[in-house]
Image (tube, rainbow, N blue to C red):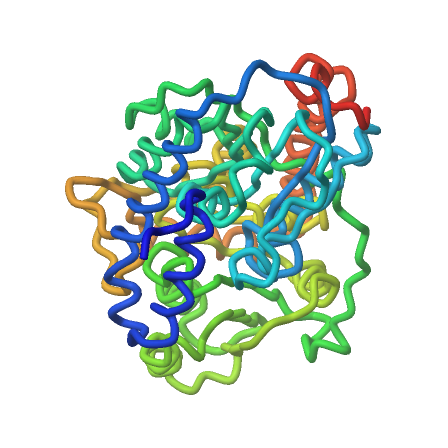
Amino acid sequence: MKPPRDSSAWLTASRRVWRSMAPARLRRSAQPIVLGLMEQGIRGALRRGEGGDRAGPLVVSGLLSEAKGISEGARLTLAALQAAGFGPVAHDLRPVFSGVNTRLPTDQPGGVWLMHINAPEATHALGRIHSDAWLGRYRIGYWAYELARVPRQWVRISNVFHEIWAPSRFVAEALRESGVETPVRVMPHPVALGSQLIQPDRKALGIPDDAFAVLAMGDLNSSAARKNLIGAIEIYQRAFPTPDAARLIVKVREEGAHPAFLARARQLAGGRADIVFVTGDLSTSDLRRLVASSSLLLSPHRSEGFGLSLAEAFLAGVPALATGWSGNLDFMGDLPELLINASLVPVNDPYGVYRASKQMWAEPDVADAAARLRKLADAPDLRRDLAERGRRAIEGFNGAWSREALMETAIGRLSLTG
């Protein structure tokens, strides 16, 4: 039997059979092959031609209903475009990826399609949605990556887009240095535009009123090695070798998929009552309340594409002590008191999220971090001053998302909803 003329329909049918028959491990190992087939289908559609740009709706796609960092970024993008008066059409991609709905939320042609998902997911979206729905739309990919060079698949698929947006100079440079020739625009996450003032509630969270509460958090699916929560525990223990009037709260997400990490972290904590683990998903408001109830956010990361949780902490009036490398320098570069010294070392991710030969990331200095943490614990006025300076830096990103600035982009030129 010949495959359907439109390769996206054939790929969708093939994936259903594959998911029903193949083990999960085998499916993961076959992802490069699947992406390659999708790329072929996408390029085949483009060879049919799509004409010039024309005005139409502004569609913003992403995993809008999920708790991932990239999902929060997509929601912020949507909120900023709404605030600027462009009336974007929201499009949750989860039904597309689940095979429930493989259409865009509008049949009106032209305009702009902004996909706030990374290159592999964007490839899946383009491959699963019938090409007639996206040919002729100006395509923007909003991508974030945490190493100094992006995977080759990202470079290959980048020329399917008319431009790429990156949340930081670090990501933009990684894209360009990797060979991406599509125009790259730095568009920092509009965190201040989407933030809501959340009042701290230490009593509800079980945090003593007089405690110096240090919060470290990370999604383990984003690589426990990169987030370096083990390092956060080591830094805290060096700063506070015996239980004191301090508290470390380790917020972990997706712990069920990484039981070995949590076992190691609990063993390192040694049963200390001042080191508390919070697992599972929290609502956005509950997570923001946890951040607002903390005295400081500790992030000895090995790399960040932007550092969304750090930015949100500053907006909540909470300073972030973080590694002095990668995307967070866009808003922390002028806060040397909060930057942990680090050296660059070869990437080694035992959790397998980053398989990056000959790439480097940061190794934060535990002793330097502990000394800075101890100093900040004893200086509440300094913490307030640093948090305020960080907040002003984050609010400085608002200009890129103003109506005036966006009118100078393809969104202003092609969006009928504005």
Q: Residue 392: x, y in percent?
A: 70, 32
Image: 27 above or below 54: below
Q: Residue 227: x, y in percent?
A: 41, 57
Q: Quadrant of the N terminus?
A: bottom left
Query: Which residue occupies the extreme left position in the image?
Result: 358
Indicate the quadrant where residue 52 lies: top right
Indicate the quadrant where residue 182 lies: top left
Q: Residue 265: x, y in percent?
A: 37, 76
Image: 396 above or below 75: above
Image: 127 above or below 336: below
Q: In the figure, is residue 171 to the left or right of 203? A: left
Count the labels in the image. 0
Residue 378 in view = no
Q: Which residue is nearer to you in this view: 312 or 144?
A: 144
Q: In the figure, is residue 233 to the left or right of 139? A: left
Residue 90 in view = yes
Q: In which quarter of the image is the C terminus?
A: top right
Residue at 61% in and 16% down: 53
Residue at 55% in and 53% down: 69
Q: Which residue is nearer to you in this view: 138 or 318?
A: 138
Residue at 43% in and 32% down: 45
Q: Which residue is nearer to you in this view: 176 or 314?
A: 176
Q: Residue 332: x, y in percent?
A: 53, 35
Q: In the figure, is residue 274 to the left or right of 390? A: left
Query: Which residue occupies the extreme front position in the image?
Result: 1
